[in-house]
Amino acid sequence: MPLADRALIVGIDRYSALGALSGAERDAAAFYDWVTTAGGVQPANATKIVSSNFKKAPKSKPWNERPAQQAIDDFFHAVQAASDANNAAGEGPQVGKRLYMFFSGHGFAPALDRSGVLMANASPAAPINVAAMLWANRMYEGGWFDEVLLFQDACRQPMRQADLSPPFLVSLGLSGLEKRRRFIALSAKNDQLSLEKKINGADVRGVFSVTLLDALKGGARDPLTGEITAAQLKSYLQSNMKTLLTSQELADPEIASQPEVFDPDPFVIVGPPPGWAAAVAEEFPVSIGLKGSRDARILDHDLKDRIVQAGAPDPWPVTLPRGLFRVLAPPYSSEVFEVTGALRPNGVKEVTNVAVQ
């Protein structure tokens, strides 16, 4: 029997001691809706933990606010119980092919490559948290799943003397690490704020979460294959999150305009939809500075000629689909560049500028 995919979705709006959020639970609900449909996870295997699932704690006891860390611990205890049951049945200790993890709420970053999501009962004096990235890496390294995807929409500003709550499960120690895959995307880089705001005049949502769902619902889809790969999702997130920010927000260095996406393993995250027919790839404007008119050519990622131009002008305007390209301008000049397909906040296609040395 095939192993089931699983998902852990957490959205915390209610923080009695830290200040409430407005869009975290909506973001979690939107991800749950996607992951249990197009994402392929059966609702019975998708755990959604949100503020409205719990009764509000007395104002005098903010440390009793929920969801607390135990709710997250329960999910991972259940993962281990499933591993034990599979192993006892002679199927091996692996739990599933893929694990999705989505967190939206307040967060902090105790170090450059670390990040924690604060639980509802956290306070400045007691930063109770779940180390989502450490958990994703433990699930990946330990072998419970073949593929682990983590999406975290939370601030990553430092908190003095705050420690991460480490994963408590002991690695299964399964071989085959070279075949496993992971994708980790955090909404902000170290020491930055994740912004939530009204999107297009509608409800308050996390800027990262809206960009992520747009990508997964087709924005990052390859127009020829119909697939959404890890590389395409990374490119879409890093190029398009900023389009939801105003010029004032973009000018504020404390507000994240690009997510932190750790170099993903190459794999297909979403396959083509049923009945997919390849479309003509949408093209985007590129301006190539050649330091004077000269012969030039553009190669695609397979090193095949895409455009050849004798006496190309300077600058040389062309249009290309998303992807990696190389421009050659004899005798010696060569430059690799990427067309990301980014849009400006007003929806106009952003020009990719390339300078040939």
Image: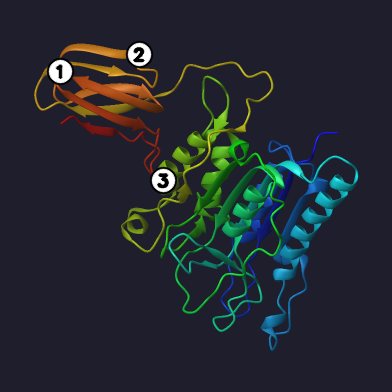
Contact, mark 3 vs mark 1 (Cβ under 8 Å): no
> For the residues carrying marks 2 and 3, which lies nearer the camera in this image?
2
> Which of the pair 336/179 is nearer the observer?
179
The kind of residue tagged 1 is Pro
Q: Which quadrant of the figure has residue 228?
A: top right
Left or right: 46 in relation to 30: right
Vertical placement of residue 48 versus 88, above or below: below
| Badge 3 or badge 1: first in the primary sequence | 3
Contact, mark 2 vs mark 3 (Cβ under 8 Å): no
The kind of residue tagged 3 is Thr
Left or right: 156 in relation to 315: right
Residue sitting at x 35%, y 22% = 320
| Badge 2 or badge 3: first in the primary sequence | 3
Q: CA distance from mark 2 to mark 3?
A: 32 Å
Q: CA distance from mark 1 to mark 2?
A: 17 Å
At label 1, counting other C-alpha atoms closer than 10 Å, the crowd grade (few under 14, some 14-19, many 20 or more) is few
Vertical placement of residue 321 versus 94, above or below: above
> Which of the pair 86/193 is nearer the observer?
86
The secondary structure type at the circle numbered 2 is loop
The secondary structure type at the circle numbered 1 is loop
**Residue 350 point in image, percent of width and height:** 33, 36
The quarter of the image holding the C terminus is: top left
**In the rendered image, which residue does mark 1 sit on?**
330
The kind of residue tagged 2 is Lys
**In the rendered image, which residue does mark 3 sit on?**
243
Q: Is residue 67 visible?
A: no
The quarter of the image holding the N terminus is: top right
The secondary structure type at the circle numbered 3 is helix
**Residue 354 point in image, percent of width and height:** 24, 32
Residue sitting at x 77%, y 69% = 54
Q: Which quadrant of the figure has residue 28?
A: bottom right
**In the rendered image, which residue does mark 2 sit on?**
304
